[in-house]
Amino acid sequence: MGSPEGRRCQLCHTAQASAADSPRGEETSYPLYPGHIPTSPLQKALLAAGSACMALYNPYRHDMVAVLGETTGYLALHNLRERMKKDPEGHRILQERPRIRLSTLDITGLQALPEGTFGREYVRFLDDNRVSPDTRMPTKFVDDEELAYVVQRYREVHDLMHTLLGMPTNMLGEVTVKWFEAVQTGLPMCVLGALFGPVRLNARKLYVLTTDLIPWAVQSASNASCILHFYYENRWEQTVESLRNEIGILPPPVISV
């Protein structure tokens, strides 16, 4: 008998194989962008179910979290795109389609920026948490080329949100960021992570989350402008404090866990 994780993964693997190999209708018979895998509604439902099971079982399976976001997020992504189009800076991002990758970042230059600047603190976040912008999964299952970029942009600014919110990549930090992103984006994947992520926290951390972090994250997200409206690549020399103020993010609470 296979492992519990293997059994949970079987549904998602079956759906991915079906999406990659089975005949498709005329509407989705060809890729719309590099890496795109066209899928039918049934295939999307299978992918969503399988990836949801795996993401709940292991929240650090970023590949499953990515699949869940793509297969359940059409309405939220459409809304985010329309909001970006109505904002001058957001519209420019949709036109120019910048990417946040090691190949597009001047890491040495960012490390040389003064303490407290957005670029310096972002690189510090990457170093302290041993993460890389290149680990973000490419979009595969979104059947709209522009929406595929919107979800890719969301993924690539996720670590920037950690930096601005002052949250590490441990479970408490991730759940806090997910609450912020859930209110900001409306993506079902973020809502799921916000609601079910806390079950893995101990009593002390759960108390801090519910009494301090969630109220702050929800208030900040409600108060802030859309996080996809900002051309962060042009803000590296801006201080974290001033960028928070511009976006509308409230100062993080001081916590002890």
Image: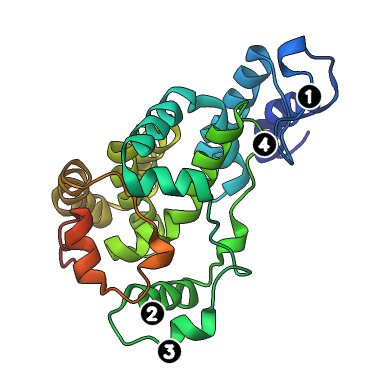
Measured Cα–Cα span from mark 2 to mark 3? 7 Å
**From the viewer's perspective, is the residue at label 3 or at label 4 nearer?**
3
Residue beneath label 3, please? 112
Q: What residue type is labelled 4?
A: Lys
Which residue is label 1 attached to? 30
Q: Distance between the residues labelled 3 and 4?
A: 36 Å
User: Residue 124: x and y, percent?
Assistant: 42, 78
Residue at (54, 39) in percent of width and height: 55
Q: Earlier in the sequence, mark 2 or mark 3?
A: 3
**Quadrant including the N terminus:** top right
Residue at the image point whose x is 25% and y is 74% from the top: 239
In the rendered structure, which disc, 3 or 4, sits on the residue that comes first in sequence?
3
Q: Which of 117 and 257 is in front in this view?
A: 117
* 246 relative to 66, above or below: below
Please give left or right for residue 80 compared with residue 109 in the image: left
- For badge 1, the amino acid type reads Tyr
Residue at 31% across, 78% down: 117
| Numbered label attached to residue 120 | 2
What residue is disc 4 on? 140
